[in-house]
Image (spheres, rainbow, N blue to C red):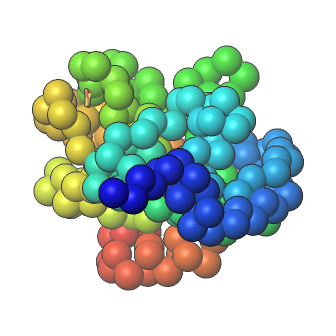
Amino acid sequence: MLEVDQDRARSETAEPQRAFEISLRINDVEYRLVADARTTLLDALRDRLHMTGTKKGCGLGQCGACTVLVDGRRIVSCLTLAVMSEGKAITTIEGLSQDGHLHPVQQAFIDHDGFQCGYCTPGQIMSAIGMIAEGRTRSADEIRENMSGNICRCGAYTNIVDAIQDAISRGIDPPEAMTEAVQAIRADAGPGGER
Ligand code: FES
Ligand code: FES
């Protein structure tokens, strides 16, 4: 019977890794790292740069726990390669508070108990900020629809919608530099999508 050294077989058949020097601009700070071309933005953030605020849920683009903003647009970082984010402005939950003050959406989540275990919360907050910039928040139904990519296993959905509506009513400054991608989404949102 032919015995196969599984580890050796795996190492001989595995594709050679290709490491790249990557430069990432995260929360207005430039970071450099050497990483395999297949490294996801999520793994670069959490495992290489130790920014663990962004959470890993499914790793398959289905739960939204890993949502961050890239050039103001919300994306799931588990399905985005780090190399694809070079030259872009990446915003994570760590970059929201200013001068010791929470972002209005963060504060509203606290005020409305918009979480229980909190695992989905960074992704919910980043997605909410992206959605508000997109102008897709004209009703509770529209908010629910446009937050549907963010799963909360604790079922805090009602309070999450309340928190988002409260944050909007308090007033949120639009992004200083709204990218073409976000402008296009706002235009697509139709009348009333503009704020
Ligand atoms: S971890 Fe990225 S969508 Fe679930
Ligand atoms: S607060 Fe627990 S998963 Fe959303």
The mark total stands at 0
Q: In the picture provided, is 183 more to the left or to the right than 155?
A: right
Residue 144 showing in the rendered view: yes
Q: Is residue 27 above or below residue 21?
A: above
Of the four image quadrants, the one with ligand 2 is top left
- Of 192 and 162, which appears nearest the observer? 162
Q: Residue at x 55, y 76 (%)?
A: 181
Residue 103 showing in the rendered view: no
- Of 121 and 130, which appears nearest the observer? 121
- Of 159 and 61, which appears nearest the observer? 61
| Displayed quadrant of residue 38 | bottom right
Q: Is residue 194 above or below residue 111?
A: below
Q: Residue at x 39, y 59 (%)?
A: 2
Q: Position of residue 135 (x, y in %)?
A: 39, 64
Q: Residue at x 14, y 32 (%)?
A: 155
| Displayed quadrant of residue 193 | bottom left
Q: Is residue 20 above or below residue 156?
A: below
Q: Quadrant of the N terminus?
A: bottom left
Q: Residue at x 61, y 21 (%)?
A: 101
Q: In the picture provided, is 191 more to the left or to the right than 92?
A: left
Q: Position of residue 7 (x, y in %)?
A: 53, 48
Q: Position of residue 96 (x, y in %)?
A: 60, 35
The residue sitting at the front extreme is 1
Q: In the picture provided, is 183 more to the left or to the right than 120?
A: right
- Of 189 and 15, which appears nearest the observer? 15
Q: Quadrant of the C terminus?
A: bottom left
Q: Position of residue 191 (x, y in %)?
A: 33, 77
